Image (cartoon, rainbow, N blue to C red):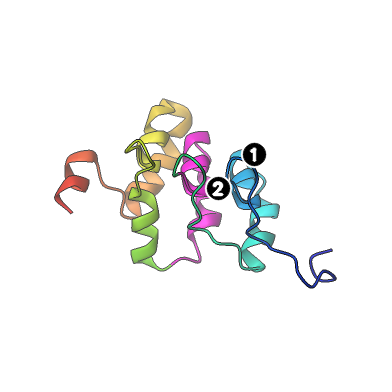
């Protein structure tokens, strides 16, 4: 359908200002996320609460989704996305940590890819 539609907006937003990538990340649909990324979706897009798809994947504790979202991003951008606060100052790293054991793999992945703890983030 995407290939046949001339004016298809891959970054179209819903009433929560979410793009299709936000929903794919929240629902853990890696194949859909990969397809959207291939078609040029904005990985940095923020929804109404200032959260990116990375926030939503981290909140789910989904390391595989985080890898999908961040693997094609330059290291500096990866670090930026991992440490980006939402409208309430909450980062993806913090959201993964809240999941405790469920989010441990996601948390460790983000730490290895530039994630900073609160005090470290404030110094940057």
Nearest the eye: 65 or 91: 91
Residue occupying image coordinates x 46% and y 39%: 49
Quadrant into which the N terminus falls: bottom right
Q: Which mark is residue 122?
A: none
SS under mark 2:
helix
Q: SS class of the residue under badge 1?
A: helix
Q: Is residue 9 above or below residue 48?
A: below
Residue at point 38%, 50% (across, down): 82
Residue stretch rendered in magenta on the structure: 51-73
Pick whichever, 82 or 102, lies toward us: 82
Is 67 magenta? The answer is yes
Image quadrant occupied by the C terminus: bottom left
The circle drawn on residue 64 is: 2
Which residue matches tag 1? Answer: 27
Q: Quadrant of residue 106?
A: top left
Determine the residue positioned at 50% across, 66% down.
72
Q: Disc 2, disc 1: CB below 8 Å?
A: no
Counting from the top left corner in percent of width and height, residue 46 is at: 49, 50
Instruction: Give residue 117's position: percent from left, percent from top.
Output: 24, 41
Please give left or right for residue 42 compared with residue 36 in the image. Answer: left
User: Toward the viewer: 51 or 82?
Assistant: 51
Q: Callout 2: few (<14), some (14-19), or many (20+) C-alpha neighbours within 10 Å?
A: some
Q: Which circle, 2 or 1, is nearer the viewer?
A: 1
Q: Position of residue 14 (x, y in %)?
A: 65, 45
In the rendered structure, which disc, 2 or 1, sits on the residue that comes first in sequence? Answer: 1
Would residue 7 be counted in the magenta stretch? Answer: no
Q: Is residue 35 left or right of residue 42?
A: right
Residue sticking out furthest to the front: 15
């Amino acid at each position: 359908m995407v290939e046949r539609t001339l004016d298809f907006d891959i970054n179209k937003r819903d009433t929560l200002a979410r793009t299709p990538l936000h929903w794919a990340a929240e629902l853990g649909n890696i194949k859909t996320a990969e397809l959207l990324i291939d078609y040029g979706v904005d990985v940095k897009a923020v929804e109404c609460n200032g959260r990116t798809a990375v926030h939503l994947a981290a909140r789910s504790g989904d390391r595989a989704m985080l890898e999908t979202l961040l693997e094609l991003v330059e290291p500096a951008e990866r670090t930026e996305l991992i440490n980006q606060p939402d409208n309430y100052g909450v980062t993806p790293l913090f959201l993964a940590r809240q999941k405790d054991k469920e989010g441990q793999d996601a948390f460790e992945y983000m730490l290895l890819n530039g994630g900073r703890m609160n005090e470290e983030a404030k110094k940057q």
